[in-house]
């Protein structure tokens, strides 16, 4: 008979009882045998420690009592212990049976009441069952339609799965493209950052250069101001000279008009002289012809020769006069060209005055 032990653990008394029970059966009280006797509870270390204590106690008591008396005492003690445990166990079992009986009686009353209620509910359930059967038939029909719909939906689900798989493939492709784009964007950002830094450094350099240029321009502006002052004075002088040249141009214009009138008179005189020359040349040819016809007449010849000489001298004088007038006309043309050139220079100087550096 094994010892029933609570979950709280083992103690020395329980180990002692188990050891005595094993010895009473004539077996060796080993650690495993005692643990089995205790219902496979308790650690082997604790059982070993209690066994050593019990062996020490037995070792101290053994010299005083013979073995037969020890066995008798042990058997009496075991019998007494067993009787006490049996009585306690019987009392517990009786109390437990009484409680179980009361509980069974209560449950029986409740069961009888429940049976009455179930019998009343049975009729209702029968009617409900018929209604449920009708609903079941209707549900079967609906279920058949639902099966068809489910098959159609299943097909749609398969199609959606196929599309979903394609979408997943597209998503993976897009993710790869996104990764490439992100890498490219990061590279672009890095390049842009470097470019901005370079531009900033270049901008700072340009600012420094511009500041130097501004200082140089300020210095140049001071110089230009001095030049502007000088040029303003020069401009005033040039304006005065331009007014004077304008007066001279007007005077030259009047002189040119007078020269043009003189040239016109000379042209008229030249034309008249040309007519006279042509008449004299015609007369000379006539006289030469007459001389050829009347060369035989000596007296007439000498007269004609004198006339011819006179005519030749007149022609020579006319040629000299014409040459002189032609030279005067050439000089007048040159003077007129010079005057026109001077007038053009004055007109350009008046229309395009010299630019002032400060007016840029």
Image (tube, rainbow, N blue to C red):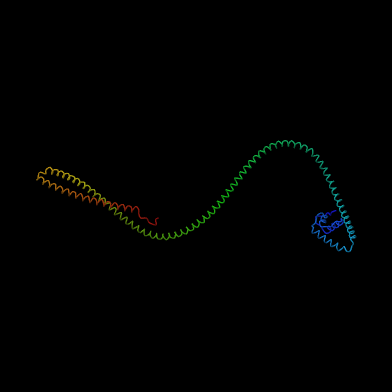
Q: Is 93 positioned to the left or the right of 265 in the image?
A: right
With 12 as the anchor, is 208 left or right in this view? Answer: left
* Quadrant position of residue 230: bottom left
- In front here: 100 or 341? 100
Image coordinates of residue 74 in percent, x first then y, are 88, 58
Residue 140: % across, % down: 72, 36
Question: Horizontally, is 73 left or right of 339 in the view?
Answer: right
User: Residue 89 at x, y = what percent?
Assistant: 86, 53
Indicate the position of residue 50 as horizontal and vertical percent values: 82, 60
Q: Which of 192 and 127 lies nearest the eye of the viewer?
A: 192
Image quarter for residue 219?
Answer: bottom left
Quarter of the image for the C terminus: give it: bottom left
In the image, 333: left or right of 206? left
How many numbered marks appear? 0
Q: Nearer the viewer, residue 89 or 228?
A: 89
């Amino acid at each position: 008979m094994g010892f029933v032990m609570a979950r709280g653990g083992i103690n020395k008394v329980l180990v002692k009882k188990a050891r005595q029970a094993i010895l009473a059966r004539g077996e060796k009280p080993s650690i495993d045998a005692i643990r089995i006797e205790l219902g496979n509870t308790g650690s082997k270390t604790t059982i070993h420690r209690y066994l050593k204590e019990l062996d020490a106690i037995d070792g101290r008591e053994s010299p005083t009592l013979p073995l037969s008396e020890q066995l008798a005492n042990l058997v009496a003690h075991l019998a007494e212990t067993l009787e006490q445990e049996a009585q306690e166990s019987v009392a517990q079992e009786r109390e437990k049976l009484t409680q179980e009986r009361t509980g069974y009686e209560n449950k029986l009353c409740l069961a009888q009441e429940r049976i009455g209620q179930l019998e009343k509910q049975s009729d209702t359930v029968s009617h409900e069952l018929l209604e449920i059967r009708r609903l079941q038939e209707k549900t079967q029909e609906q279920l058949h339609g639902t099966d068809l719909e489910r098959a159609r939906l299943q097909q749609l689900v398969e199609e959606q799965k196929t599309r979903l798989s394609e979408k997943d493939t597209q998503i993976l492709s897009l993710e790869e493209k996104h990764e490439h784009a992100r890498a490219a964007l990061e590279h672009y950002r890095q390049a842009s950052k470097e470019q901005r830094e370079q531009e900033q450094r270049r901008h700072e350099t340009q600012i420094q250069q511009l500041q130097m240029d501004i200082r140089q321009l300020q210095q140049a502006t001071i110089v230009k101001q001095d030049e502007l002052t000088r040029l303003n004075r020069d401009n005033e002088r040039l304006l005065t000279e331009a007014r004077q040249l304008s007066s001279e141009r007007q005077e030259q214009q009047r002189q040119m008009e007078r020269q043009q009138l003189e040239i016109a008179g000379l042209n008229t005189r030249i034309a008249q002289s040309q007519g006279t020359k042509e008449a004299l040349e015609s007369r000379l040819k006539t006289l030469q012809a007459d001389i050829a016809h009347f060369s035989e007449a000596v007296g007439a010849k000498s007269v004609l020769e004198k006339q011819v000489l006179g005519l030749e001298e007149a022609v020579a004088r006319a040629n000299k006069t014409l040459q002189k007038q032609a030279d005067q006309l050439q000089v007048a043309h040159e003077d007129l060209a010079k005057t026109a050139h001077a007038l053009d220079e004055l007109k350009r100087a008046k229309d395009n005055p010299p630019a002032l550096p400060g007016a840029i």
